[in-house]
Amino acid sequence: MAARHFLTLNDMSTNELENLVDHGSRLRNEWRQGKVRDSLKNRVLAMIFEKSSTRTRVSFEAGMTQLGGSAMFLSPRDTQLGRGEPIEDSAIVISSMVDAVMIRTFAHETVEKFSQASRAPVINALTDDFHPCQLLADMQTYREHRGSIRGATVAWIGDGNNMCHSYINAATQFDFHLNIATPEGYEPDPKLMKAHSDRITLMREPEEAARNANLLVTDVWASMGQEDEQKAREKAFAKYQINKALMDLAAKDALLMHCLPAHRGEEISAEMIDHPGSVIWDEAENRLHAQKALLEFLILNRLD
């Protein structure tokens, strides 16, 4: 049977995604109760990092260990990937030796090419275009605190980046409406917006997007690789900050999320990290548990 890959949320059905986040919550509860689980005993995950990471590396490596398996860290400095070997050749070799491959890189084309040649499941752990693993954690966190997100309104405040793109996919897959507030010139991919036009509304004013929203989400103004744009982006995004005034416009029981790392005083005011509606720390921890559910599903082809 051909390997299942997870490059965007669209690689799963809505039912599969909802089962994944529910299973992630079960795994979180088991872990907190101290239960030992060895579902991936003797299984190996290859972790390919072309972009540095904190949460992604720790969550995948810890997750494999908690499930009885192991993970190996691979960087371009340590492999032929950084010395010009074709991606497809690396995929054939690496996937013949491991049970799954996780890739965190720049070009989305890299994970697509790798998956096409891989006989093991490939997971997109972030590209410049999408960050689906973070959305699993976000959807799990919302469900744990407020139940199903179906029919809710989510406000994305900030750059139309890879996180925003994955929220657009999530709006269709999890059946919610997404308000996107971003300055001119920083909109999400036009083709993606057109494909999901019935699920999103593009706005310029963050206050308009946040009004009566059930969830407010943001990300850094300048992502990895955009450091040279920092000053220009600070100017463009100056009013696109989640702060108490913006949060007060949202629904009374609205939640606040941020995929981290957060630049306090820029996209989010410092006090909002610990706001009563903030679930940022649960969201961060759920990267571990949502990805454990994903690993079991892709490697074992089941959730139990």
Image: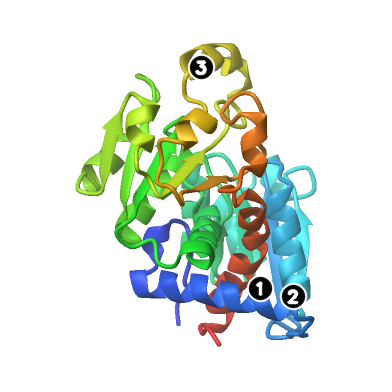
Q: Amino acid at mark 1?
A: Arg
Q: Which residue is mark 2?
A: 32
**Residue 169 x %, y %:** 36, 52
For the point 71% across and 41% down, which residue is it? 52
Query: How far from the left and from the top, in percent, is residue 158?
Result: 46, 30
- Percent position of residue 79, x then y: 75, 50
Front-lying residue, 21 or 270: 270
Residue hosting label 1: 28
Q: Is residue 38 above or below residue 221?
A: below
Q: Which structural element holds mark 3?
A: loop
- The mark that comes first in sequence, 3 or 1, is 1
Question: Decide: marks 3, 1 in contact (CB < 8 A)?
Answer: no
Query: Do labels 2 and 1 touch, CB within 8 Å?
Result: yes
- The colour scheme of the drawn protein is rainbow
The residue drawn where x is 46% and y is 52% is 253
Q: Nearer the viewer, residue 237 or 123?
A: 237
Circle 3 residues within 10 Å: few <14, some 14–19, many ≥20: few
Element assignment for label 2: helix
Closer to the camera in the image, 202 or 59: 202
Kindly identify the residue that appears in the image at 35 percent across and 24 percent down.
Answer: 205
Cα gap from disc 3 to disc 1, whole angstroms: 37 Å
Which residue is label 3 attached to?
Answer: 238
Distance between the Cα atoms at labels 2 and 3? 40 Å
On residue 195, which mark appears? none
Q: Earlier in the sequence, mark 2 or mark 3?
A: 2
- Work out how far the residue at label 2 is from the one at label 1, CA to CA, in angstroms: 6 Å
Which residue shows up at 59% across the image and 60% down it? 91
The residue furthest left is 198
Inspect the image, locate mark 2, and give the three-letter code of the amino acid beneath it. Answer: Arg
